[in-house]
Amino acid sequence: MSALTDLDIAGALAGLATRAFSAVELTQAHLAAMARARALNAFIVETPELALAEAAESDKRRLAGRALGPLDGVPLAIKDLFCTEGVQTTAASKILKGFVPTYESTVSANLKRAGAVFVGKTNLDEFAMGSSNITSAFGPVKNPWGPPLGRVGNKELVPGGSSGGSAAAVAAGLALGATGTDTGGSIRQPASFCGIVGLKPTYGRCSRFGIVAFASSLDQAGPMTRTVKDAALMLSAMAGHDPKDSTSAPLPCPDFAKSVDQPVKGLRVGIPKEYRLDGMPAEIDALWRKAEDWFRAQGCEVVEVSLPHTRYALPTYYIVAPAEASSNLARYDGVRFGLRVPGETLDEMYMNTRAEGFGAEVRRRILIGTYVLSAGYYDAYYLKAQQVRTLIARDFRSAFENVDAILTPTAPSPAFALGEKMEDPVAMYLNDVFTVPASLAGLPAISVPAGLSANGLPLGLQVIGRAFDEETVLRAGRAIERASGINAIPSRVAAG
Amino acid sequence: MALSRDQVRTIALLARIRVKDEDLDAMAKEISGILAWIEQLNEVKTAGVEPMTSVAEMTLPLRADKVDDGGIAAATLKNAPEAAEGFYAVPKVVE
């Protein structure tokens, strides 16, 4: 059965179509792998009974010749930031422990409508705030590339974050794909750390309805998969206009899988010179340059572009995101849902509940957000950041007058050891230096495994595209995948 | 700009998060460190630059002004820590 967990979505769909195996068998194989891999802590809730029931329904439909949709019978994992009707949804926070939504997020509902089977809810950084999955109230996730495969000494490695559980689950063969959300890099950075594909679509492509809000002007759902084609398949099922999200784009959603294999000949690929940071590891710089050659060999023109405000993206993000978070997270007051810690007065009840319910990083960001929005400081911080954000978006717009896609590394390092970078919040924030600019500009961007580091860990490269041009992003991602030729699937879990 | 203990106390009150007195100094130091790093934005010339209000270049849609949802009070109260008579229950606020 273990072979079924080595498939990709496209391969699984082919096998289901020819009845080589059933959806129940496919789901059982993944549930068994989940049970063997509990040490990774990739899931907060496992839903084996629901999954098997859904898989049995899928088999019935297929036998009757009326498969539901393009993902019928495919086992997927859902980040525990998506509200799932009847299944606990926590955002990895103590404040939402035991919260069972009475409604379904639009993205997960779309996937269900396409026939997907949900195996469980994946672990994440609390409220998606983090880059290593260590802020989860349910404990950290371990990267399936940890020892003996990839090594930083003998320590366990972080999977990245915030969608660390989703990335680990897909890399370890516990699900064929997973949903992630990306606010400043939360899909792409863990994808890079775990050797999988992660796509952040254009802001507005996927509905935010039913996703626990972090920073509403940045949050975007996207697929995390083993191949670029799978990301295309999953995105087509997730995306689409939704009247319940006023920022959801009223645009038709293309069949992304159709165009993903088209050649990239003639594409103009930009290399932003400001992304070549001092102190960037030589192996990441070398991989980035190698990828330029891959694009040239496939008939692309590679040109230098300039994004002059790149270095201001992170500090801008760390005003905008906490500001929005402080406002969004005001809803956790111990009244309507989640934890309540009693107090003598209403205010005391609020203060006790929020002190007890939120973890240290979340409290820190709420306080920063409250400060930058407070009277007397709003202009100096928040307004200033929104102005710089305009300049960052303008940089991209100018660059895209000359190129069709922009190629960069995804992260400034491979996965690091659990327990590193814990002391200094700013050092942790620097993980997102290459991913945050596209988030601030609302642009689609993909991370694709492109090589391995000297210590045997996966390294991803990022392709950023024009707004609503996921098709080019996916095609360019596929070009990297075609050329890199690495099989970035760790075998530690499957073997053990 | 470096935050004082008292400023952190005020922010924490605004955010309705209890911070213990003994934690105020550490918190002030931590947040001040982050703010100092953020303040590199002052190098950027932004005079006359329009602040971004929406990353999506679209006008927000209007819907018809009619009720299209509701009648789900029981489901809405289902996750309440304390509910009574179809309402959320909170500590007494009026003497």
Image (cartoon, coloured by chain):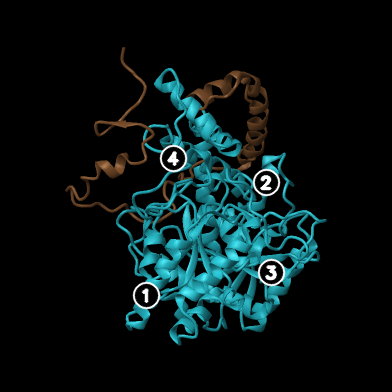
Of mark 2 and mark 1, the one earlier in the sequence is 1
**Residue at the image point whose x is 68% and y is 28% from the top:** B29
Given the image, what chain letter belongs to the residue carrying mark 1?
A
Helix, strand or loop at mark 3 = loop
Q: Which mark is residue A328?
A: 4
Measured along the vertical axis of the image, is residue A390 above or below residue A249?
above
Of mark 3 and mark 4, the one earlier in the sequence is 4
Of mark 4 and mark 2, the one earlier in the sequence is 4
Amino acid type at mark 3: Pro
**Crowd band around label 4 with a 10 angstrom C-alpha radius: few (<14), some (14–19), many (20+):** some
Q: Are marks 4 and 1 in contact (CB under 8 Å)?
A: no
Quickly name the residue at label 2.
A428
Q: Are marks 4 and 2 in contact (CB under 8 Å)?
A: no
Give left or right: position of A193 versus A466. right
Q: Nearer the viewer, residue A224 or A267?
A: A224
Q: What is the x, y in percent for residue A278?
A: 76, 54
Snapshot quadrant of residue A289:
bottom right
State the separation of the CA atoms marked 3 and 2: 25 Å
State the separation of the CA atoms marked 3 and 4: 37 Å
Of mark 1 and mark 3, the one earlier in the sequence is 1
**Residue at the image point whose x is 72% and y is 58% from the top:** A413
Give left or right: position of A179 versus A125. left
Q: What is the x, y in percent for residue A54?
A: 40, 67
Q: Are marks 1 and 3 in contact (CB under 8 Å)?
A: no
Quickly name the residue at label 1.
A69
Q: Nearer the viewer, residue A85 or A59?
A: A59
Instruction: Confirm whether circles 4 and 2 share one chain.
Output: yes
Of mark 3 and mark 2, the one earlier in the sequence is 2
Amino acid type at mark 1: Gly
Measured along the vertical axis of the image, is residue A159 above or below residue A20?
above
Q: What color is chain A drawn in?
A: cyan
